Structure formats: C-alpha cells, structure tokens
Amino acid sequence: MVISIPFLKKTPTVAVLRLTGTIAAGGRGQLNDQTLAPYIEKAFTKGKPAAVALVINSPGGSPVQSSLIAARIRRLADDKKLPVFAFVEDVAASGGYWLAVSADEIWVDPGSIIGSIGVISAGFGASTFLERQGLERRVYTAGKSKSTLDPFRPENPEDVTRLKTILNQLHDVFISHVRTRRGSKLTDAQDLFSGEFWTGQHSAELGLVDGIGHLVPLMKERFGDKVKFRNYDVKRNFLQRFGTSIVHDAFSSIEERAQFARFGL
C-alpha cells in the first residue's frame, strides 16, 4: 500500500518536447500540427510538469504549420499556466525560429544558427526546354489567374507581382509574431527581418534569444538538481521505419537535407 504524505515536496518534472526536422503538412518525419498535437497535449498535461522545454532543430518550412504548432503551444501554456523554454541545437531558422518564439525564453548554443525571418518561394521554369524539344504546352482555364505561375509557360510579370504581394503579407505576419513575443528584447542595431541569419552568440546580442544555455544545466538551475525530465519524441510507425514508401521517403530526405544545407549544416 502506498501512503501519500501531502506535506512532502514533490520533485519537479520538466516535459521535454523534441521538434526536429522540416515543417510541412502531411510529410513523413516532418513537423506538422496534426502529427505533433498528441505529443504537445501530453507534454503539458501528463504528470503536472513544472515547465515544458522545446528542443528545436529545424530549418523551417510551411508558415501555416509553423503558426498552428506555435499557437497550440501558447494555448496550452496559457491554459495550464506553465513556463515554456526553447533550447536550440543546430538551427532554428525561418519556421524553426517561429516555433522557438512561442516559448517564454529562448536559449541557444554559441554555434546555433538563428533567424532567417523571411518568406521564400522557389521553383523552376521549363518553358524554354519544352520549346527546344518541340513540345507545345496547352492549358485551358475558367478564370484568368487559374494557371498562375505555371512552370511550363513563360513567366508572366503580373503573376510575379501577385506572388510577391502574398510573400510580403506572410512576411508581415511573421514579423508581427516575433515583435509580439520578443517585444522590447529586440535591438534596433540592424534589420532583423531581412531574412539574414546569425550565430547563437550574435543572436543573443540582437535580442532574438535570451542567452547561451543548455537544457539540463539551465533546468537544474531553475528547478533544482533533482529535477526530472520526461521526454516526448515523435516516433515513426512500423511501416515507416521499414521503408514501405521508400521513394517518397528518399525525396523527403533529399529535400530536408537541402533545407539544412542552406545554413551550412
């Protein structure tokens, strides 16, 4: 029989949620709100944690999924009145930084890559190739903008203008999110929203993060040497681990490596 002694102080526990990979809807091994939802919910509710720690290693991806994940974290943090700490490993850039900003404090390694607060749209144009091969592209639409940015047709300046307008609007949302969460911590020393990225050491000087610090020592400093950690890692199912969709997974892996490579990783 277990006897509960109410006046004995309970050893604090920190829930650790690892967010590793690119951010995209529905991708295997990628971060998205649907996949992460049960893990985030458990991190905030299971065992009455003293805090939630986000361990982030992400070069970014979908702005919508970044927003959904960050919003879920903030809703639960406010509802449960729990502090949230972000610990960046190699990189928290673009959407990865969006996730980090959802925390109350952001801690990094001196060599972490931080920032890239911008929005990008990239693709290829194959109209000249088709022409050289004697191929004719035939497209019929109802609605003059239905074939906007068709990569197999010559680039239309009006399409580019519309795209840039959308990118600027998304950029404004990103900037607003960062300003709301970081507030007066941000420096005016240089343009923080140009898409540039910095090392962890420099990002601390710019106010993008709160300082240099690692998960275990900082949590022990905050909650005592006896603090416990409960880890929540997103796990792939049996079929994914044994390569049921080998081609799809291979392309996803290549795309993810390309995203990390942008930051020299």
Image (cartoon, rainbow, N blue to C red):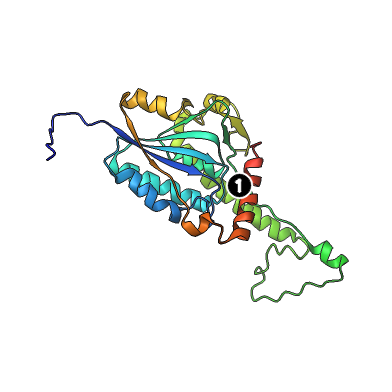
Q: Nearer the viewer, residue 172 or 209?
A: 209
| Quarter assignment of residue 124 | bottom right
Number of marks drawn: 1
The image position of residue 254, as x and y in percent, is: 65, 50
Quadrant that contains the C terminus: top right
Residue name at image x 48 percent, y 43 percent: 19
Residue name at image x 50 percent, y 59 percent: 239
| Quarter assignment of residue 222 | top left
Residue type, label 1? Val
76 over 250 or under it: above or below:
above
Question: Is any part of residue 25 visible from this angle?
Answer: no
Tell me if mark 1 has few (under 14), some (14-19) or many (20+) residues whose alpha carbon lies within 10 angstroms of its own.
many
| Secondary-structure class at tag 1 | loop
The image position of residue 121, as x and y in percent, is: 65, 52
Q: Nearer the viewer, residue 171 or 204?
A: 204
Q: Which residue is mark 1?
A: 119
The image position of residue 256, as x and y in percent, is: 61, 48
The image position of residue 148, as x and y in percent, is: 68, 64
Residue name at image x 46 percent, y 56 percent: 237
Question: Is any part of residue 257 visible from this angle?
Answer: yes
119 lies left or right of 184: right
